[in-house]
Amino acid sequence: MPGPLDTILIVTDRARTRALTAAIGLFFLVGAVVLAWNIPLPLVAYSPGPVTDATDSITVEGATTYDTDGELVMLTVAGQDINAFEALVAAVDPTVDVLARQVVRRPDESDEDYRRRNLELMDQSVQAAITVALSRVDRPEGQSAVYVTGYAADTPAGEVLEIGDRIVALGGQRIEAAEALATVVQSNSPGDRVPLEVERDGQVLSYEVELVAREDDPDSPMIGIYVRQLPFWIDIDTGIVGGPSAGMMYTLAIIDVLTPGSLTGGHVVAGTGTIDLEGNVGEVGGVRQKVVAAEAAGAEYMLVPAGNLAAAESAPRGDMELVAVETIDDALAFLDGLASD
């Protein structure tokens, strides 16, 4: 029979063994976590992104605008590449979806190429939103002007012009249509310097700009700017958001700002969906995360492309109502019903 000292020694040995086992287990656990953290996977996690009131992004000059009640909430998703550890965490989070990177990115597409592609898609969406919105509001008959909507920073014109400048005259000829601007430019040659007048903040500014050669046709001149013919200036501040999925909400926001009353009737309405020049609303990615973001923003209703309805219904939500739409007119009809309640 062991004595008291033997008992103490046995207990001490067992305690040391347990401590050593725990230390070894902790070592391997920490090693596994570190390893998982540093193993990149070809996966992208989608989570709910920030939201904004789309009407706050709209600037109109040269036309009457109206105050609005309620909100038209524009939704986004946050997408990020993940490692093995983050994939495990995402797997148990019902608000996060994990997609294969190849579903989101093109083969061998760099981060910069991906960013540029999404910004181009957003720009196309903005132009479509403006076109569709203007087709559904009253505007002055015969009023039209050519505005600078973008420019190449490495051209002489890009160094002096600003987005929103109205082209008044080029080469001594008054410009009221985009076709007239193109005609004057093509009547010159690369390297020619031509007088250019623009209106900015109510003042007419005069410059002399050098025409540059087109990359695809060295004999053809260009100013190096993007222009759009509009009855008045409309700008959409998209911030750092890319992609086309805000098209429907921007269209509604422009209509809301340019028409008396409020489209939402004072309600908080969220939504997502692309828009084309015919007013069709197209499907988007990350709709489940947008449902979560919409409800967190206090939306009572969410406008969803009809093709995304099933996915939207699978997202965790409370009392917020999902409304399927196929066209901008479907969305306007629903909002008209809200406003008349």
Image: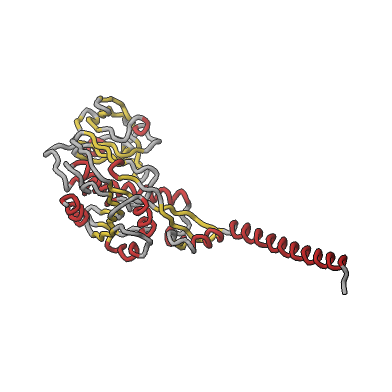
Residue 181 higher or lower than 204, as above or below: below
Q: Nearer the viewer, residue 332 or 17?
A: 17
In percent of the image, x 31 and y 62: which residue is there?
A: 308
Q: Nearer the viewer, residue 129 or 159?
A: 129
- Label total for image: 0
Residue 70, position in %: x, y? Answer: 26, 45
Residue 204, position in %: x, y? Answer: 25, 25
Residue 197, position in %: x, y? Answer: 26, 28
In percent of the image, x 55 and y 61: which residue is there?
A: 84
Residue 151, position in %: x, y? Answer: 34, 38
In percent of the image, x 29 and y 63: which residue is there?
A: 307
- Quarter of the image where one finds residue 254: top left
Residue 121 visible to the viewer: no
- Quarter of the image where one finds residue 181: top left
Residue 331 visible to the viewer: yes
Q: Nearer the viewer, residue 301 or 110?
A: 301
